[in-house]
Amino acid sequence: MGKENAGEVGKGKTIGKGKEKLSRPEKKKVNNPVGTSPITRSKKVIDEGQGSVSVRTSPITRSRKVLGLGENSLPVETTPKKKGKKKQVTRTLVDEPIIETDPEDSDYIIPEDGEQYETDDSLGDNELGSDDEEYRDARLNLRLVEGVVQEREEGDLPDDVSMSEGRSADPRGSNTEGDEGMLSDYIVSDGDVVSDSTDEEEGSKRLPRIMYDPRCNHKDLIVQIGLRFENGYQCKEALRSWAILKGYPIRFRRVSKKQLDAKCRPPCIWRCYGSDIKDQCTFAVKVLVGEHTCLFDIHNKLADYKWLAKQYIEVFRLRPCMQVQEMALDVNTRFSIQPSLGRLYRAKAHALELLRGSVKKHYNSLRSYMSELMRVDKEGRFELLLGDDSVFRGLYIGFSALRKGFMEGCRRIIGLDGCFLKTYLGGQLLCAVSKDGNNQMFPVAWAVVEAENEECWSWFIKILLEDLGVTDGLGISFISDQQKGLQNAVASLAPFAEHRNCARHVYCNWKKTHKGATLKNLFWRAVRASYQQEFDLAMEEMKAESQEAHTDFMNREYHRFCRCFISTHCLSDMVDNNVSETFNGYIVKARAKHIITMLEDIRVALRGRQYKKLGLVTDSTEKICPNIRKKLDKLRYDARMCQAYPGLGGKFEVSCYDDRLMHMA
């Protein structure tokens, strides 16, 4: 090969030793189906021989060709193809420098149609025929650069992530299944990726399949390249929980459904980037930079009130009245963080709102709730009181089963009382509670109102009397505290009903100015006296002890709360309103909830209680209720020292120790 051959090829540089030289034409950027990568490093050893030149190509060369130059050919050594390997497909690279060659040149052999060339791109590191460390590093860097370029062209990688940062410190470390992850995916001119795999398998071979489990322990979560999520928001919540438990003060620079960019607080260089996998509805972590070098943050701002509410939602489901101070100690123990009390209060409120819904939603659903109650209990009484502009003022609840139970098996006495609701809107719960045959509470009806005043009490008592079929109150006894609005409502709506005052409320007001154990005992002795002579004796002793106390007692309408003056038609000697207080204590937990949840808790609790009491009565073989039997047994024991002496005209005399009593038939 001399100057003539060099002239035929074109102008260029000459290489070699001796008289015969090979011409190297100038390189141009044109499309060539058989090109080599611009980063391919080739070293050739050209030796003069007897009319032939031997060219040795490095294993990193992507294409292995057999070029014939006349009679003297250039044999090129190639790595033998291993048996059982998948047949490789020739890929096209873009804008790569090639050698211009004349197709008509007799020294240039054009590949026949269908002929393919072997490449080493799909081979694993342990399958290569070379032990050259530089070659292995070049393969690794090539994959690193191609991946970053592709993601930047597709818009999946921020511009401020340099290629030197790479996709991880060692991309090979993310593949735990041999060398299957070391695939060669070439970038073509339109930015797509061409590989041996199908479009569905392409993403899975580029990144390992490690799916995130929301039920995992986030403290043991391993954040790595290829960790997959449903979307960017799920990835954010996972990284948030992981960072809080680990104490990392990371910040989210960009969060959307398809992209996420998180960075730790300086001087820590940790950074995480993730985006959607192309043609898949899957989100994956694609860039991890550095390791955490920051200290544990006990005031981590990632633990906001929403995250805390989510962690404690099941706790508040069981304990809705849990104190914030107790919650603060538990948060410090579980997560080693110290949020402010304000954040804890907001977390508790948010958790209760998630459990019960918003207050506005509850009040907007009252009509639907009433319709459902009337559908289930067609004989019940349910009334909704609205003010101007449809503002809520009251809701009356009266089940038919409770009304029938009162009419058929309860004493004709009803305790009236109100209690506060423990929500931020406030309000009152009015209740009407009677005594059953066993001297226990028996709720008749209740209502939720805006305030405990005469107007609300009048509305409640009016519906109650209509529901019981007693319009003027004849044959009914009411007992309540000394609330003026309630007394006026009973007097106007039930003029023939007996209205007792609760002796316990009277004493609470009376003892403010008359204190002492002696006056206290005399007060209750006078209240519980069953006949007037005993009452008079107690009052004389009180007068001797304190004239002011005696006068104040007589001015408090004593005939309404002293046992010897109350009527007996209701078959109850009750002088206090303990049944209403018992009902208020029975529903104390429900009173802290929103209106519909509260009413449902009351209904369910009373239904279970009625079922339990029915079982006790059904299993009993006596005709007298258990509590009444105990009371009679006690009276019989106390009367063991009493002696009765009959007289004429139905009169008889009873002596008990030094006391003698005359009973008139």
Image (cartoon, rainbow, N blue to C red):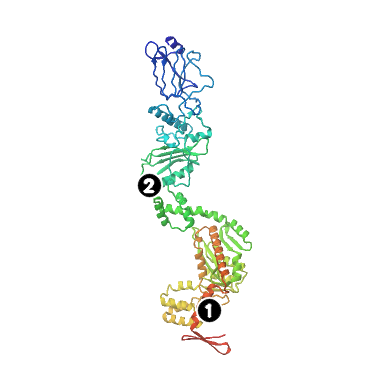
Q: Which mark is residue 164?
A: none
Image point (59%, 66%), residue name: 402
Q: What secondary structure is found at the residue carrying circle 2?
A: loop
Task: Point out the residue furthest to the right here.
Answer: 378
Callout 2, which amino acid?
A: Asp
* Crowd class of label 1 (few under 14; some 14 to 19; many from 20; radius 10 Å): some
Relative image position of residue 68 (x, y in whole percent): 47, 15
Relative image position of residue 233 (x, y in whole percent): 48, 43
Relative image position of residue 1 (x, y in whole percent): 43, 11
Write down the residue under mark 1: 565
Q: Is residue 76 visible?
A: yes
Q: How many marks?
A: 2
Q: Tell me: 338 left or right of 214.
A: left
Q: Tell me: 382 left or right of 482.
A: right
Closer-to-camera residue (2/479): 2
For discs 2 and 1, the disc positioned in front in the rendered view? 2
Q: Is residue 39 visible?
A: no
* Crowd class of label 2 (few under 14; some 14 to 19; many from 20; radius 10 Å): some
* Figure quadrant of the C terminus: bottom right
Closer-to-camera residue (545/6): 6
Closer-to-camera residue (509/313): 313
Looking at the picture, does residue 456 appear above or below residue 341? below
Write down the residue under mark 2: 297
Q: What secondary structure is found at the residue carrying circle 1?
A: helix
Looking at the picture, does residue 254 appear above or below residue 582? above
Callout 1, which amino acid?
A: Phe
Relative image position of residue 11 (x, y in whole percent): 43, 13
